[in-house]
Image (cartoon, grey):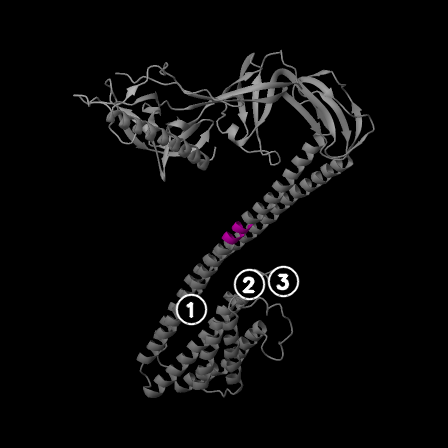
């Protein structure tokens, strides 16, 4: 019943009772006018009937359910196929795993063959990837060992060169008396080496960068490898080399020009060496080629530094001889300068060798990381083809239709040679050793049905709810409920009557329901009359309440009443205030009740009244 219907219903009751009250009051007044007033005023106590509020609402309803086997299976085709053999017939008993029907499906066989081929290819790819990665790692390891060996060689050679430099210094100490002519010859000899040496260095750098007309566009292999890790710096170096080449073409033999040109050449070689270290390698331009060009540039640096040293030494010797003939102090200073220069070259060679070891170590670690990534990718592809192969094998296995459990064959609607499509029924199997009753309930009915609830079956037996679907059928909007039943009296395929009994509860315990006749509505105020006190004459109390939905002749009370409260059922319409003493009407009083009981599809019984305990 909607809330507004409840309001209209109670309002009409209230008007009717108000009219009766006015008539009774008038009768009392008229009677008093014709008699003498009593010496003692009598206390008038209204008579009421009351009940004690009990929590919960026993809800009972009936519906129809279908008896089925607890274990049943309808096996349908999942792919297009041809029936090649039928090994059982309807009525046969089968065990779990027994072959019932055999199918032939070309698409399934082809898929299995393709999956096998793909898996084999992926497996071979994994092995090949591992082999290639191992080769790359081994090659990088050999490069690292080579760089370490080269470092050892440089260190040994530097020991011998240090001895030579020290011997040259000692020889300079002995040969202090050089003549002017001898010094001039030495200087000219040093100057004469400048042109050829610088020309050789420029030619080597030209071969690397291909900036002159002789080499430009000759071979683009170096262009796409040399210095590609910093192309802007590469352009800067090429411009620097072209300026050096221009200076070389205007060179005139003299100590000053030679020294400037040699220093410029050293700087150009330094920049070239930096560019080479910013290069990349490939099968077209190998690490070995790059290492060779680096070694060549380092050698030319050493040669030019030697010539600069010789040039400076010869010039110093000449100056010394010219300034102070016979004096050996300046000669000795020059010899020491040569020695220090040689030591600087030795240190530079060692540093270069150490850098090569570091670069080789990085290349080795990169090769190891690349090997891992490649293998992971290949194994991932193998895992994918393995999954496809497993699915293909599962589909292939389904060509032999087997019994999923022990039971009886109900139907095989097939003939040998039949062409079947996906979804075609192949075989129906049941095991009726345990029965299942299936019914469908509305959202309101299923709200108080839970797994484990007892259900009456045809009022002759009981069973418990085994499952309640969490979602409704999208078409019927009803929820599937299953009940397991073990008695053999029922037959699969028959319909039986089911009776559900449940008690409504809320999150804090049992819900509270009150008879509609006990609820009063005055405008926007909704309340009930309750009784307080345990004496002979309990007193009235006005209790505002909040109500919710109506179930039969009862309404749910959300707040304002609790289990144990004594509620006035009849006589409350005559009350107008709290604190009035009332008399319980014994003629209408009956025994105590435990629960409010409402049964679907039948009338709701009247709630029984209760004499408050003293």
Residue at 35%, 81% in the rendered image? 177
Residue segment shown in magenta: 364-370
Residue for badge 1 = 345
Residue 328 appears in view:
no
Crowdedness near tag 3: few (<14), some (14–19) or many (≥20) residues, C-alpha within 10 Å: few
Q: Which label is found at residue 280?
A: 2
* Secondary structure of the residue carrying numbered label 1: helix
Instruction: Judge depth for marks 1 and 2 and give the one in front.
Output: 2
In the depicted view, which residue is nearer to us: 138 or 12? 12
Task: Name the side, left or right, on which 428 lies relative to 448.
Answer: right
In the depicted view, which residue is nearer to us: 146 or 132? 132
Q: Is residue 197 above or below residue 417?
A: below
Decide whether residue 588 is among the magenta residues.
no
- Secondary structure predominantly adopted by residues drawn in magenta: helix
Residue for badge 3 = 284
Task: Name the side, left or right, on which 196 lies relative to 333.
Answer: right
Q: CA distance from mark 2 to mark 3?
A: 11 Å
Q: Which label is found at residue 252?
A: none
């Amino acid at each position: 019943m909607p809330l507004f219907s409840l309001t209209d219903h109670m309002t009409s009751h209230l008007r009717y009772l108000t009219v009766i009250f006015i008539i009774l009051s008038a009768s009392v007044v008229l009677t008093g006018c014709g008699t003498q007033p009593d010496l003692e005023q009598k206390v008038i106590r209204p008579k009421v009937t009351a009940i004690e509020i009990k929590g919960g609402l026993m809800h009972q309803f009936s519906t129809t359910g279908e008896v089925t086997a607890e274990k049943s299976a309808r096996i349908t085709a999942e792919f297009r196929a041809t029936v090649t053999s039928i090994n059982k017939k309807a009525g046969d008993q089968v065990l779990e795993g027994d072959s019932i029907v055999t199918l032939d499906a070309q698409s399934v066989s082809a898929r299995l063959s393709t999956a096998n081929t793909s898996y084999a290819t992926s497996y071979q790819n994994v092995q090949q990837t591992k082999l290639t990665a191992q080769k790359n790692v081994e090659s990088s390891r050999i490069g690292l060992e080579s760089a370490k060996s080269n470092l050892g060689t440089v260190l040994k050679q530097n020991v011998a060169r240090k001895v030579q430099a020290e011997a040259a210094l000692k020889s300079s100490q002995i040969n202090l008396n050089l003549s002017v002519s001898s010094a001039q010859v030495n200087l000219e000899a040093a100057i004469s080496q400048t042109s050829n040496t610088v020309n050789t260095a420029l030619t080597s750098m030209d071969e690397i960068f291909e900036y002159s007309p002789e080499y430009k566009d000759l071979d683009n292999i170096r262009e796409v490898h040399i210095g590609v890790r910093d192309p802007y710096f590469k352009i800067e170096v090429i411009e620097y080399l072209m300026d050096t080449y221009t200076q070389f073409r205007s060179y005139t033999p003299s100590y000053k020009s030679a020294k400037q040109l040699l220093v410029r050449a050293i700087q150009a070689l330094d920049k070239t060496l930096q560019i080479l270290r910013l290069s990349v390698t490939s099968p077209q331009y190998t690490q070995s080629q790059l290492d060779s060009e680096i070694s060549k540039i380092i050698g030319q640096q050493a040669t030019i530094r030697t010539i600069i040293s010789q040039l400076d030494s010869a010039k110093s010797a000449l100056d010394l001889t010219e300034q102070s003939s016979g004096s050996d102090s300046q000669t000795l200073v020059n010899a020491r300068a040569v020695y220090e220069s040689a030591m600087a070259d030795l240190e530079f060679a060692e540093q270069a060798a150490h850098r090569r070891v570091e670069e080789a170590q990085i290349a080795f670690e990169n090769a190891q990381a690349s090997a891992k990534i490649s293998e992971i990718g290949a194994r991932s592809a193998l895992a994918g083809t393995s999954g496809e192969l497993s699915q293909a094998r599962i589909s292939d296995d389904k060509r032999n239709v087997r019994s999923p459990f022990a039971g009886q064959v109900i139907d095989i609607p097939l003939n040998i040679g039949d062409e079947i499509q996906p979804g075609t029924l192949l075989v129906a199997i049941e095991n009726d050793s345990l029965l299942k009753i299936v019914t469908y309930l509305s959202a309101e009915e299923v709200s108080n049905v839970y797994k484990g609830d007892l259900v009456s079956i045809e009022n002759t037996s009981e069973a418990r709810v085994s499952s309640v679907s969490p979602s409704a059928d999208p078409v019927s909007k009803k929820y599937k409920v299953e009940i397991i039943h073990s008695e053999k009296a029922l037959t699969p395929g028959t319909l039986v009557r089911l009776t559900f009994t449940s008690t409504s509860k809320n999150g804090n315990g049992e819900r509270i329901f009150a008879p509609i006749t006990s609820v009063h509505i005055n405008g926007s105020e909704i309340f009930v009359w309750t009784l307080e006190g345990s004496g002979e004459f309990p007193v009235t109390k006005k209790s505002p309440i909040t109500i919710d939905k109506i179930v039969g002749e009862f309404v749910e009370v959300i707040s304002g009443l609790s289990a144990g409260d004594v509620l006035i059922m009849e006589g409350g319409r005559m009350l107008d205030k709290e604190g009035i003493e009332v008399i319980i009407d014994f003629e209408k009083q009956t025994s105590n009740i435990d629960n409010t009981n409402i049964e679907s599809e039948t009338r709701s019984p009247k709630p029984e009244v209760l004499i408050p305990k003293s």
